[in-house]
Image: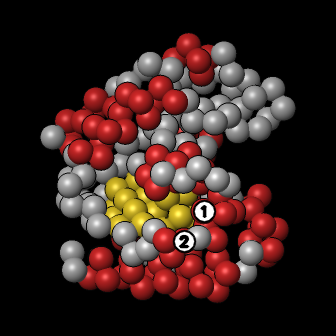
Amino acid sequence: MAEALAREIAACRICADRFAATATRHAPRPVPWFDAHARVLIAGQAPGAQVHARGRPFADASGARLRRWLGLDEATFYDHARIAIVPMAFCFPGYDSRGADLPPPPVCAGTWHARVMAALPRVELTIAIGAHAQRWHLGARGRVRDTVAGWQAHAPRAFPLPHPSWRNTAWLRRNPRVEGELLPALRIRLAEVLRDD
């Protein structure tokens, strides 16, 4: 079921007109990365331009930082039978006229997200990155800062994270509890889930 669904998502073109109208004028390239056996879910926002080009999630500097945060090597991180990477939109949404990332189109989550979650019955740990993923997976209604600060309310089944983008470096310096408390607890929980795999 999960493999057939991943193929269906990979063939999706529902946002072709939307993406053609962006500053990047790109074609859809969905990047599904999940398997029914996965015990860990990394729920993100949407692929960036480098992921769009490479066809692999978090294949950029943000991904390198995320792997450092999680204490995972590339082989483990990209083992989709252990770790599912499911963004709120499977395609790069493009840039606006000022070169800023566009948000994930809601039609993607509305079309695919519930079906993907139903195809992942073994997930024991959800890592929700960014506001869109935190709203869907954690029911968060506030700002990312507040959701991340209250991470213990969701642990040990879920951990909210800010996006690992370089743009958040100053924010991380102002919020040292992320690296001092949240990430160590997350690494311990992640190791427990993967060890039991």
Q: Position of residue 150 (x, y in %)?
A: 59, 70
Residue count near mark 1 (Cα–Cα under 10 Å), binned few <14, some 14–19, many ≥20:
many
Residues marked 1 and 2 touching at CB (< 8 Å)? yes
Q: According to the image, what is the colour scheme of the structure?
A: secondary structure
23 shown above or below 95: above
**Residue ID for mark 2:** 151
Side (left or right) of 157 relative to 195: right
The residue under the point 15% across, 40% down is 1
Please indicate, yes or no, whether residue 15 appears anywhere in the rendered image: yes
- Amino acid tagged 2: Trp
Say what secondary structure mark 1 lies in: helix
Please indicate, yes or no, whether residue 73 appears anywhere in the rendered image: no
The residue under the point 56% across, 13% down is 17
Q: Position of residue 86 (x, y in %)?
A: 41, 48
Task: Find the distance from the CA under tag 1 to the CA under tag 2.
Answer: 6 Å
Q: Position of residue 32 (x, y in %)?
A: 37, 42
Say what secondary structure mark 2 lies in: helix
Seen from the viewer's position, the closer of residues 161 and 55 is: 161
Residue count near mark 2 (Cα–Cα under 10 Å), binned few <14, some 14–19, many ≥20:
some
**Residue ID for mark 1:** 147
Side (left or right) of 164 relative to 172: left
- Amino acid tagged 1: Thr
Side (left or right) of 143 relative to 108: right
Q: Quadrant of residue 108?
A: top left
Numbered tag placed on residue 23 in the rendering: none
